[in-house]
């Protein structure tokens, strides 16, 4: 199992007039992400600071980038274009511990 850093950004379906929790499909997205966290697939996650567009970062524990992309593509927000993948990095943890 390896660790990955994923950066997602608002997609074409993101409504700039609404906050993150007011976006269409928020409850379904939140339930999906909570389930991934409960499985320890998502280790950490949340929105990033002030960017021109909404961005979020996830720390993922997965056997490969292919598995990671397949699982995250099932997110209702990825499927409907509210979010899109921006960057995926493999990550070698040298300091601290992840459980």
Image: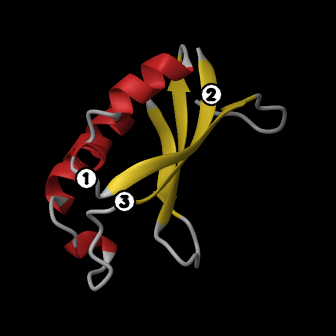
Residue of label 3: 11
> Sequence-wise, which precedes: disc 3 or disc 1?
3
Q: Which mark is residue 69?
A: none
Q: Is residue 5 left or right of residue 53?
A: right
Label 2 crowd (10 A; few <14 / some 14-19 / many >=20): many
- CA gap, disc 3 to disc 2? 24 Å
Residue lying at 26% horizontally and 51% vertically, measured from the top left = 77
Q: Considering the numbered disc 3 on the image, is that residue within a helix, a strand or a loop?
A: loop
Residue lying at 21% horizontally and 50% vertically, measured from the top left = 80
Using the image as rendered, state which of residue 99 and residue 80 is in the foreground.
Answer: 80
* Snapshot quadrant of residue 24: bottom left
Residue 77 in view: yes
- CA gap, disc 1 to disc 2? 22 Å
Label 1 crowd (10 A; few <14 / some 14-19 / many >=20): some
Q: Is residue 5 left or right of residue 35?
A: right
- Determine the residue located farthest toward the bottom in the rendered image: 17
Q: Which mark is residue 3?
A: 2
Q: Which mark is residue 30?
A: 1
Q: Considering the numbered disc 1 on the image, is that residue within a helix, a strand or a loop?
A: helix
Residue 28 rendering spot, x and y as whole percentages: 16, 50
Q: Considering the numbered disc 2 on the image, is that residue within a helix, a strand or a loop?
A: strand
Q: Quadrant of the N terminus?
A: top right
Residue 76 rendering spot, x and y as whole percentages: 21, 45
- Determine the residue located farthest toward the front in the rendered image: 12
């Amino acid at each position: 199992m390896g660790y990955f850093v994923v950066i997602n950004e608002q997609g074409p379906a993101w409504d700039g007039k609404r906050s993150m929790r007011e976006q269409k499909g928020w409850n379904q997205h939140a339930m999906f992400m909570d389930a991934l966290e409960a499985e320890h697939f998502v280790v950490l996650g949340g929105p990033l600071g002030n960017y021109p567009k909404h961005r979020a970062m996830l720390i993922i524990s997965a056997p490969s980038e292919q598995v990671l992309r397949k699982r995250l593509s099932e997110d209702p927000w990825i499927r409907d274009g509210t979010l899109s993948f921006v960057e995926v990095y493999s990550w070698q943890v040298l300091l601290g511990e992840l459980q």
